[in-house]
Image: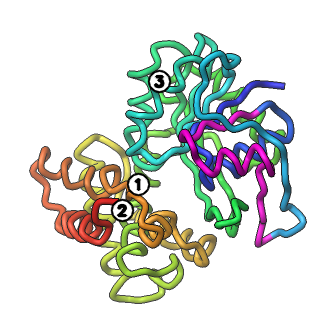
Amino acid sequence: MFNILVAGPGAVGQVIGGSLARSHTVTFLGREGSQRIDDINQKGVRIDNLRFPKQSFTVQAKAVASLDGWAPADLVLLTTKTYSNDRVLPKILPVVTHNTIFLSLQNGVTSANQMQKMFRMGSVLGAFCFMGAAVLPSGIIELNSPERVIVGDLNKRSSDALSFVMDIFTEVGISITQSENIDRDLWIKLLWNVGIFQWCAFEGKTIGELLSDESSLQQVRGTMLEAVNIAQANHVSITREDIQTQINTALTKYAPVTPSLLQDLRAQRPLELGSFAGFISSEGQRLGIQVPYNDFLFEELTRLSGNY
């Protein structure tokens, strides 16, 4: 049994952390005074699997706002929103040792580098996940799509850490795939973030509703192509052919999903725009590449979200 820290008890954190808690000791790190800390401590992690009801479960776990005096972590999962990293990462330091393995399941392509700079010991792996899930007002997590994690060795020096993560995820039934090129795959996920999730938020649609509308589909393709151009300028091997592949996957596997970005907008929570359109726009300026779709989305979604 291993000690696992999940920094961020949101939908993704509780689905993955809750699954791991069935075989390991899992602690969730949340905000001081957070209702989710109280919910987890009092009622456990409660996952309602809409696709496969028999796979729904409740498991007991611990949730805290501080890790001072806490046992060292064998594995740290970062599942907060990216805009919280400056606040959350220093809170993890008390449980870090040279043997700690770090895994960011955040959106965007910069989190692993942030963790490498913050934690000078341990092993940082590259990772991301696909999942349609939401925290209900009751605190129950509603899961309505397959959960899938992709993980890879960023520097080709952490094979033991990679094997460890693959093994413990597989043991508890989490679908996990080893990436042979995690940098490329992180940028592939960014195509979803900027092209699908942002337009879903702007138009107020599920993934299926968005991609079934031809005019919306053209906007999605244009936005993704801008990200491809930025990736190629950064020597990442993705092409415009990857765009249709991701659209097809989204339609066949995730059509009913309401992305978390739209959920956050509706709930008047802050949006991760700095890791999505904001990142592509700033890279466009740095590289001299025009990205009008992402510029538009960054401006409009910032306006719609206000100062939450």
Of the pair 10 and 66, the residue shown nearer to us: 66
User: SS at mark 2?
Assistant: helix
Figure quadrant of the C terminus: bottom left
State the residue position of label 2.
194
Q: Give, as a three-letter code, the residue at label 2.
A: Val
Q: Where is residue 198 in the image (x, y as percent from the top left)?
A: 37, 68
Figure quadrant of the N terminus: top right
User: SS at mark 3?
Assistant: loop
Q: Give, as a three-letter code, the residue at label 1.
A: Leu
Residue at horizontal 69%, vertical 38%?
A: 63
Of the pair 85 and 75, the residue shown nearer to us: 85
Q: How is the image coloured?
A: rainbow
The residue lying furthest to the top in this view is 98
State the residue position of label 1.
190
Q: Where is residue 104 in the image (x, y as percent from the top left)?
A: 53, 38
Residue at horizontal 70%, vertical 28%?
A: 163
Gap between marks 3 and 2, in whole Å?
26 Å
Q: Nearer the viewer, mark 3 or mark 2?
A: 2
Q: In this view, does 56 lie above or below 213?
A: above
Q: Position of residue 262 (x, y in %)?
A: 45, 70
Which of pointers 3 and 2 lies earlier in the amino acid sequence? Answer: 3
Pointers 1 and 2 in contact (CB under 8 A)? yes
Q: Which mark is residue 155?
A: 3
Q: Give, as a three-letter code, the residue at label 3.
A: Asn
The segment highlighted magenta reads 26-51
Q: Is residue 144 above or below residue 17?
A: below
